[in-house]
Image: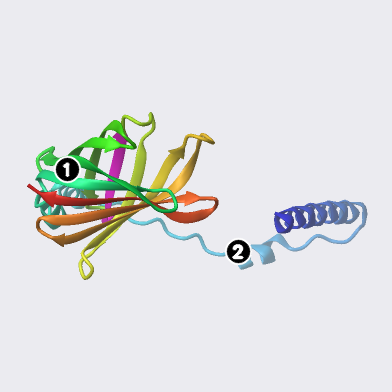
Amino acid sequence: MKTLLYSAAAFSMLALVSCGNAEKHDNNTTPKADSSALATTQPEATPEAAPMDSAAMMKAWVDYSTPGEMQKWLAAQDGKWKGEMTSFDGAPGAKEEMTQENKMIMGGRYQQSIVKGKMMGMDFEGMSLMGYDNAKKTFVCTWIDNMGTGIMKTEGTYNEASKTLEMKGLMTDPTTGKDTPVRQVYQMIDDKTQTMEMYGEVAGKETKTMEVRLSKK
């Protein structure tokens, strides 16, 4: 912050000095620089990129809207899953049962997941929409549940070697009303087993807040 203030002060001082010098030059009889000489030192304008033709535009839209390998990867997780959810508050809490049902929608472009169970002894229900953005080459996800009124948004990439999908984004901190960072790590152990670990910011430090283990029915 001090650096920014110092920079702003220095910028203001330079501006004042420049203005003062300009006034002095106006009052003196010093000849002005030859405008033709200045013109020769000006950089050439960067040519504008050629507009995309209609065929290329159409191909871009087709590629963007056509489900591919990543959408097939999501579809392989369709079906009903049963799991255990563990909340962390410095240490693991009690395990609570949950169910999750995944279904591809919009012609196989997005996966809708409905989650039901218990959280801290209360009835819990949530829903996510997960997709793979063909243009951005990244997974995108939104999440809502009955324990809030905001929408959590995350993006991430899949690591084929480790079979993990790491998603990062923001969620609302109800104690401040501001966004706070969140990170989720999905581990695909096999076709019928996966885990999800969730991390949030606690006292300025990333902390594990939840773990879910799912088995496909």
Magenta residues?
Answer: 136-144
Q: Check disc 2: other Cα within 10 Å, few if <14, some if 14-19, many if 20+.
A: few
Question: Which quadrant holds residue 17?
Answer: bottom right
Q: Which residue reaches farthest front? A: 94
Residue type for callout 1: Gln
In this view, the residue in front, 14 or 42, is 14
- Residue 21 at x, y = what percent? 86, 56
As drawn, 143 above or below 36: above
Question: Which quadrant holds residue 39?
Answer: bottom right
Q: Quadrant of the N terminus?
A: bottom right
- Residue 200 at x, y = what percent? 43, 50
Q: Main secondary structure of the magenta part?
A: strand
Q: What's the CA distance linking mark 1 and mark 2?
A: 54 Å
Q: Is residue 180 visible?
A: yes
In the rendered view, does 168 fall on the left or right side of 76?
Answer: right
Question: Which quadrant holds residue 35?
Answer: bottom right
As drawn, 194 above or below 150: below
In this view, the residue in front, 39 or 72, is 72
Magenta span contains residue 139: yes
In this view, the residue in front, 100 or 71, is 100
**SS at mark 1 in the image:** strand
Residue at which label 1 appears? 111
- Residue at x 77%, y 63% (from the top left corner): 33
Residue at which label 2 appears? 42
- Residue at x 44%, y 53% (from the top left corner): 90
In this view, the residue in front, 167 or 7, is 167
Residue type for callout 2: Gln
- Residue 180 at x, y = what percent? 47, 45
Q: Check disc 1: other Cα within 10 Å, few if <14, some if 14-19, many if 20+.
A: many
Magenta span contains residue 172: no
- Residue at x 48%, y 34% (from the top left corner): 174
